[in-house]
Amino acid sequence: MSWRRLRLLAGVVWLAVCTVPASGFAQSPGEALPEAASGYAARASARLTHTAVAAANPLAAAAGVEILRAGGNAMDAAVAVQMVLGLVEPQSSGLGGGAFLMYFDGKRVHAWDGRETAPFAADEGLFLGPDHKPLPFYQAVVGGRAVGVPGAVSMLEAAHRQLGHLPWASLMEPAIRLAEEGFAISPRLHTLLAEDTYLKTDPQAAGFYYDAQGNALPTGTQLRNTEYAAVLRLIAEQGSGGLLEGDVARAVVAAVQGHASNPGRLALADLQGYQPKERDPLCFDHQDGITGKARSYRICGMPPPNSGTIAIGQILGILGNTAAGSIPLGGTLPSPAWLHLYTEASRLAFADRAQYVADPDFVDPPAGRWSSLLEPAYLAGRAALIDQRPGSPRMPAAPAGEPAPGARTSYAPSREQPEYGTSHISIVDASGNALAMTTSIENAFGARLMVNRGLGLPGGFLLNNELTDFNFLPADAQGRPVANRVQGGKRPRSAMSPLLVFDRDTRQFMMSLGSPGGAIIIHFNTKALYGILHWGLDAQAALNMGNFGALEDTVLLEKGRFPPSTAQALRERGHKVREFDLPSGLQVIERTPRGWRGASDPRREGVVLGD
């Protein structure tokens, strides 16, 4: 199939999944909604035999399929997908952001860290005002202050050098064509442009995404981003140096340091000194709860500075020590009794996350290893804190644990604060290679800074605000430092959780998954895993199920998806309950006896394509 026919197919799929009106927008960061909702369109699984590409936009998925058909592998396809996502889904990821990548090459699992780093000139007071109190969230976000050193391109370059097959430059071609020929603004991009109040304060972005009256360009408008194409040509020729050195790097620094009201500290030396890291994957064992089909799995994800793998493993492990496994799915939704246990397990996991997890180059793991937080005996002890008597109330408090005697650190627990952004890619190729990558610029449209070199070419790319994933308060009232505080050269803690799942006994690859959603990524991914592994749902049914989660002492339920009796039953146990849009963006590819089954979240415009 030609590129033009594949692009047309992607456009048809895009129209099919994006025709539902927007359903609302969170009113405050405290509601933890990563991006605006743009509708819900139920869909069926995609069934594929040899290859599958799941991505958040049909044009990006189509680019991945093009690369696979040209002889590329899953690593090659991911590079092409990411470059297109940065063009057509600029609110979520791009050249100015970072990513975590998990890759299985048929023999071993690789974990690549492309997380942004703080400029070396950054210090603990970065997000404190003159009164030494934390800045309001968007006062910190909009401008140059929160921009970290972009790591996605460097990480992809390093991972591709080790794992890729096709020439690096050829992987830029699909995105360059789209940028130069033009692409249609999708319903979701239009919705987020219209809802955002900050992007239009950047003159370059305002002139590119809005009309003269400040209105978002309509859905279907053909947008040509020739500056983006020109930067991609530099990256094609020079690798990540095309972004982090020369004219582009100088334009990045000028945008950050030259912001009129909120300048940042990023310098050329920060860009030129960035190093992606290949880390040891963090894996844990898990047994499903499907009666008569008990099966053990090995689930692998990113270690810190990622917090998602630990939290997901803890939630699943704690639930395994409760009666949760004996509680069936209530039709198509979890019951109040199960949600109560899930919430208690989540509170315990997030307490450990707040106490321990940060950049391992700056913070030591408890008991000398991050896996100590996933030890079965430790999780059994954590589960014992939950009162499991029928109708029992919630725990008054969910303290951090101590995975080994004396393992509790001297750090203060971090306070809950908003975390946003991201997009997810899952890919399998015909040779059995598999990839899961979650990629981000943090808040929707990042720092609201569009980088353009001023050569007369329209467009450009947006910069991240990832430094707001650090805790704004560097210490508690007693002066104890927070592990995830700002420090120069440090990577902020992240909830991005790309996961690869294997059959523990046969070591056969079984599933790739991940989601955007800030801190709630942890809940979105856990929902998908539990639905598939415990309730026997196919991937699409698991994604279609109503979303839920917990932050601090509040249960989160997806608005309009749960009966009033569910919220009432949880309140009777002492839980606070909030109902609002929870637009996850899950992508899942799972093995079946006949090949692959792909699922894409009905709350966004992603699809699964392949052969």
Image: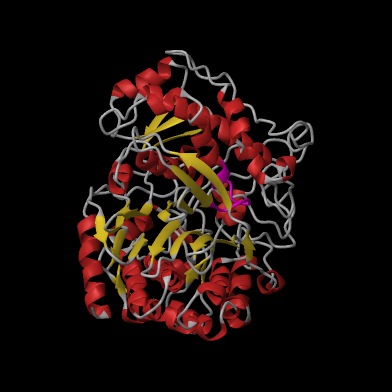
| Quarter-of-image position of residue 391 | top left
Instruction: Give the answer, above or below, for where 225 lies relative to 44.
Output: below
Tell me where residue 360 appears, x and y as whole percent: 70, 52
Residue at 29% from the left image edge and 48% from the top image edge: 540
**Residue 211 visible to an observer of this rendering:** no
Residue at 29% from the left image edge and 49% from the top image edge: 602
The quadrant the N terminus occupies is: bottom left
Q: What secondary structure predominates along the stretch shown in magenta?
A: loop
Residue at 32% from the left image edge and 50% from the top image edge: 601
Front in this rendered view, residue 539 or 177: 539
Q: In the image, is 7 to the left or to the right of 589?
A: left
Residue 363: in magenta span: no
Q: In the image, is 395 to the left or to the right of 295?
A: right
Tell me where residue 499 appears, x and y as whole percent: 48, 52
Instruction: Give the answer, above or below, for where 497 lies relative to 547.
Output: below
Residue 307: in magenta span: yes
Instruction: Give the answer, above or below, for where 455 lies relative to 386.
Output: below
Q: What stretch is highlighted in magenta?
A: 301-310
Tell me where residue 147 appears, x and y as whole percent: 60, 61
Tell me where residue 330 appears, x and y as whole percent: 29, 27
The quadrant the C terminus occupies is: bottom left
Front in this rendered view, residue 74 or 551: 74
